[in-house]
Amino acid sequence: MTHTNSPMIGEIIRLTPNGAVIRPEGLDTSRGNFAHNSCFMQGKAEVGAVVEFTPYRTPNRRNLAFDVRVLTVEQVEARRCLG
């Protein structure tokens, strides 16, 4: 079970100042705001960053948590070539 407004596994998004995200197929506002706020709260990303989310279950809880990885320009370019 996942949060309805949470990012998908391995989803790559770009953060924008108003909490929106840029993604080719689009993304609903609630999910965008969740992703935006998660990154800022964890101090792992800033506006304009491209991030990848990997959900996981915490060991002592049934809650879903997220690893947030900020991608470099090189990683983003490599994924564009592959995808």
Image (cartoon, grey):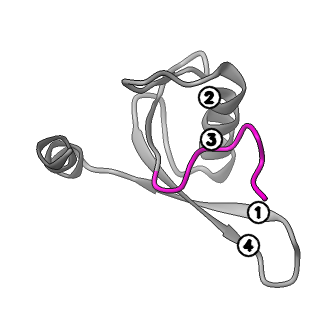
> Within the image, what quadrant is residue 36 found in?
top right
In front of the other: label 3 or label 1? 1
- Residue 6 location, x and y as percent? 68, 43
Does 74 lie within the magenta span?
no
Disc 2 secondary structure class:
helix
In front of the other: label 3 or label 2? 2
Disc 4 secondary structure class:
strand
The N terminus sits in image quarter: bottom right
Pointers 2 and 1 in contact (C-beta within 8 Å): no
The vertical placement of 68 against 37, above or below, is: below
The amino acid type of the residue labelled 3 equals Phe
Instruction: Please name the residue shown 49% across and 44% down the image.
Output: 45
Along the line of sight, which residue is nearer the eye, 18 or 80? 80
- Residue 81 location, x and y as percent? 11, 44
Q: Which residue is the site of mark 4?
A: 57
The vertical placement of 54 against 15, above or below, is: below
The amino acid type of the residue labelled 2 equals Gly
